[in-house]
Amino acid sequence: MRLRVRNTGDVVDEYRFEPVGDVAPWTTVEPQTLRLYPGTTGTVELTFAPPRTSDAVAGPNPYAVRITPTEHPEAVTVPEGNLTVTPFTEVRAELVPPTVKGRFRGRPRLAVDNLGNTKVTASVSGSDTGDHLSYEIRPGNVQIEPGRAAFVETTLKPRQVIWFGSKEERPFTLAVRRSGVDPTEVEGTYVQRGFLPRWLATFFGFALALSIAFVMIWIAYKPQVRSSATEQVEQAGAALAPSPSASAETLPSAPAAPPEQPVAPEQPATEEPKNDGGGGGGGGGGGGESEKPAPPKPVVPAQNVLLRNATTGMCAELPGREQGEVNGPVQQAVCDDTDGDNQIWDLEVKDEKGGPGGAALFQIRNVKDKLCMDLGEFGARPITTPVSEFHCDGTLADNQLWWIDKQPSGDYWIRNVVSDNKCLDVSNADGGGLFARLTLYNCTNTDDQEWKIVPVEKE
C-alpha cells in the first residue's frame, strides 16, 4: 500500500518511517526517509509479507507506521490500518513410536500438529491390510488451535493370538481426516509376538510322545502283583482248629457258635483295614481318623488383583495410564492383565471378623498411586454415589471398608459396610459402556454388581 505525506510547515524537513505493532516484523517501508519542502507532498510504499506459519493469525491484524520529523521530533504522527490475513491449513501427524511390539496389544501414540493459522477439527481412524487388528482410539475427534499439537492414544489388538511360533509384522495405517481435504495418513508396524516360543512347543510335543510311549510300555509289561494274605490266614486257622478225635466232653464249655458270617472279599496285602472304633477284644484300641482336606485359601486379603465385572467383562481402573489423584474418579475399562495400566489393586484386611456374619473388612488400595476407593465425605452414602480415590483411612470413621458376599454364580458382591452394605456398581443399566464411572447401588443379581477377583502377576 502507499502512504502519502505532506509538509505543512514552513521549513524543509526530513521524515523517518518506522513500522510498529504485531505485523511490524513482516512490514517494510520504501524509502525509509523522505525529504520534503514546505507545501510539497511525498509518497512511500509499505509492503506486507506475512509468513506461512501459525504466527500469522487468520483475520484482521492492526498495523501502524510511526512518522517522525527531523526538525520537529515532538510532532510524531502514527497512522493506523488493518491487514487481513487469509487462512491456510497444514496438518502433520507422527506415530510415537512408529513400531510397537506385544503379544496381546500395542499402544502407539499419534501426535497431530496444526501448522496452519486457523483452528483444525479432525477425526482419527485405523486400518490394515487383511483386517488383522482392531483399533481403540481415544479421543476419536480432536480440535487443535494454530501452532499447537494434540496426542491421540491408540490401542492395537490382534484378532487372533499366536500361541506358538515366531513373531509376525502387521503393518497398519492411522488416518487423520478433515472435512473437504484428503486424509493425512501415517504408517506404522505392530510386531505380534508368539505367546510361547517355537522351541517350547517342540519340547512339549517331545515330552507328550515320551509320556505316551511310557504308558504303552507299562500296560504291555505290567508286573503281576499277588497277595499272600489269604494263604497266611488259612494256615493260621488250620493250626488253631481242634483235633478231630477230641470229644465234646474234653473241650471247655463255650457259648454256642454264632451263625456263620459271609466271608468278606479278599483285600490286597498292602491295604490297611479301616478301624471304625466298634471292635472289642484284648488288643482293641481307638480307631484312627482319616485326614481332613485343608480348608480353602480365603479370597481376602489379596495382592495384585484385577476387579473384573462379570456383566461387562471390564476392569476397575483410573483414567489414563499413570497414577490417579485425590478425589479422582474410578471407572471401568478394557482389562489390561499387566501392570502397564493402573488396574491392579490390593485388598488389605483391616478387621478380620468385623463384617456381617464375621466377614473380613478390607480396603481397596490401588497399587500404582497407593490411594484407596472412597465414597467422598464421611459415613453412610446414598445410592448412585460415585466412587473416587482418597488417602487410605482403614477405619469405620470413613467409608472405605468393604466385605465380599459370594453369589450362586461363584462371583462376589463387594459391599460397603458403612453405607448399609450397598454394592459396588457400574453406572447405568447393564454395565454402561467404556469408561463408565463406578458407583454405589442396591445389591441385585439382575444388574452389574457381581465381580471376579482375578490375581495377576506383575511384569
Image (cartoon, grey):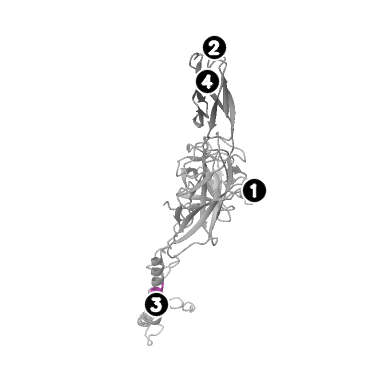
Q: Nearest the camera: 379 or 92?
A: 92
Residue contact at pointers 3 and 1, CB within 8 angstroms: no
Q: Earlier in the sequence, mark 2 or mark 4?
A: 2
Q: Position of residue 402 (x, y in %)?
A: 53, 43
The amino acid sitting under disc 2 is Asp
Q: Secondary structure at mark 1?
A: helix
Mark 2 residue crowding within 10 angstroms, few (<14) / some (14–19) / many (20+): few
The amino acid sitting under disc 1 is Ala
Q: Secondary structure at mark 4?
A: strand
Residue topped by disc 1: 429
Residue contact at pointers 4 and 1, CB within 8 angstroms: no
Mark 1 residue crowding within 10 angstroms, few (<14) / some (14–19) / many (20+): few
The amino acid sitting under disc 3 is Ala
Give the extent of the magenta segment.
Answer: 208-212
Q: Nearest the camera: 215 or 327?
A: 327
Give how far apart the Cα atoms at labels 2 and 4 are.
18 Å
Residue topped by disc 2: 10
Q: Residue at x 52, y 21 (%)?
A: 66
Residue topped by disc 4: 67
Which dot, 4 or 1, sits closer to the camera? Answer: 4
Q: Position of residue 379 (x, y in %)?
A: 56, 35
Give how far apart the Cα atoms at labels 3 and 2 are.
122 Å
Q: Residue at x 43, y 78 (%)?
A: 266
Q: Residue at x 49, y 61 (%)?
A: 161
Mark 4 residue crowding within 10 angstroms, few (<14) / some (14–19) / many (20+): many
Q: Earlier in the sequence, mark 3 or mark 1?
A: 3
Residue topped by disc 3: 213
Give how far apart the Cα atoms at labels 3 and 1 are.
56 Å
